[in-house]
Image: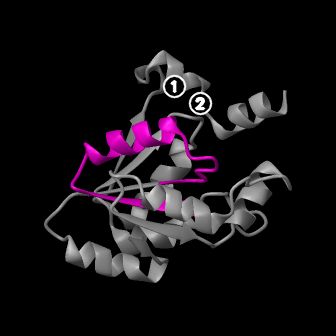
């Protein structure tokens, strides 16, 4: 279940005749919205590979109080969800001046996914397309938020934390 980035080429080789879907994120405070996202991802292919952002990345993106859940537990939670076949830690930080998604480029080259799935949450699609220049067979699939049931719009780690703090 738990893999490392250097194992991704072996994942691709083991599943060369299957459609591999790749997704990534922080997945702090794993909730039903994450599960729905993974279920949708899995409908696009036979193998779902999920990259989980490191604690250092989450602190850089969200501030010193995040993540709430340490990376080893977030890996365990995501890896334990039924749709997920492989999970690994994205432990490479973007360098100063680099786009925050730059560390995904070597991952995409190693894994060569058929689909790169993401939610429509302000993702920089122009930069993501640029990352795929060396992985031309990979297609991006974006799940629009409007396609999720209304009650799922209330689910996010930030929203949950806010509600707890009140």
Magenta span: 24-52
Provide residue 160's location: percent of width, then percent of height: 69, 34
Q: Circles 1 and 2: CB distance less than 8 Å?
A: yes
Q: Which of 23 and 75 is in front in this view?
A: 75
Residue at (36%, 65%) from the top-left corner? 135
Provide residue 46's location: percent of width, then percent of height: 21, 55
- Regarding mark 2 in the picture, which secondary structure is present there? loop
Provide residue 90's location: percent of width, then percent of height: 57, 68
Q: How many labels does the image show?
A: 2
Quadrant for the C terminus in the image = top right
Quadrant for the N terminus in the image = bottom left
Residue at (49%, 36%) from the top-left corner? 32
Q: Nearer the viewer, residue 113 or 148?
A: 148
Q: Nearer the viewer, residue 148 or 106?
A: 148
Residue 22 found in image quarter = bottom left
Q: Which residue lies furthest to the top in this view?
A: 150
User: Is residue 102 in view from this perspective?
Assistant: no
Residue at (25%, 42%) from the top-left corner? 43
Residue 44 is covered by the magenta coloring: yes
Residue 36 found in image quarter = top left
Q: In this view, does 138 lie to the left or right of 5?
A: left
Q: Where 47 falls versus 44 (above or below)?
A: below
- Regarding mark 1 in the picture, which secondary structure is present there? helix
Q: In this view, does 13 lie to the left or right of 22?
A: left
User: Is residue 13 in view from this perspective?
Assistant: yes
Give the class, few, some or many, for how many residues have Cα within 10 Å of label 1's Cα (few <14, many ≥20): some
Q: Which mark is residue 71?
A: none
Q: Which residue lies furthest to the left in this view?
A: 17
Residue 19 found in image quarter = bottom left
Give the class, few, some or many, for how many residues have Cα within 10 Å of label 2's Cα (few <14, many ≥20): some
Residue marked by disc 1:
152
Residue marked by disc 2:
155
């Amino acid at each position: 279940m738990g893999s490392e980035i250097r194992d991704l080429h072996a994942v691709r080789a083991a599943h060369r005749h299957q459609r591999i879907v790749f997704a990534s994120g922080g997945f702090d405070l794993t909730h039903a919205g994450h599960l729905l996202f993974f279920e949708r991802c899995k409908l696009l292919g036979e193998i779902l590979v999920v990259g989980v952002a490191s604690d250092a990345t989450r602190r850089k993106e969200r501030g010193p109080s995040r993540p709430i859940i340490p990376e080893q537990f977030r890996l365990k939670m995501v890896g334990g969800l039924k749709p997920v076949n492989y999970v690994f830690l994205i432990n490479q930080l973007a360098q100063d001046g680099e786009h925050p998604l730059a560390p995904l480029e070597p991952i995409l080259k190693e894994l060569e996914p058929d689909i790169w799935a993401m939610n429509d949450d302000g993702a920089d699609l122009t930069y993501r397309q640029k990352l795929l220049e060396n992985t031309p067979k990979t297609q991006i699939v974006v799940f629009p938020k409007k396609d999720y049931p209304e009650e799922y719009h209330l689910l996010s780690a930030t929203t949950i934390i806010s509600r707890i703090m009140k």
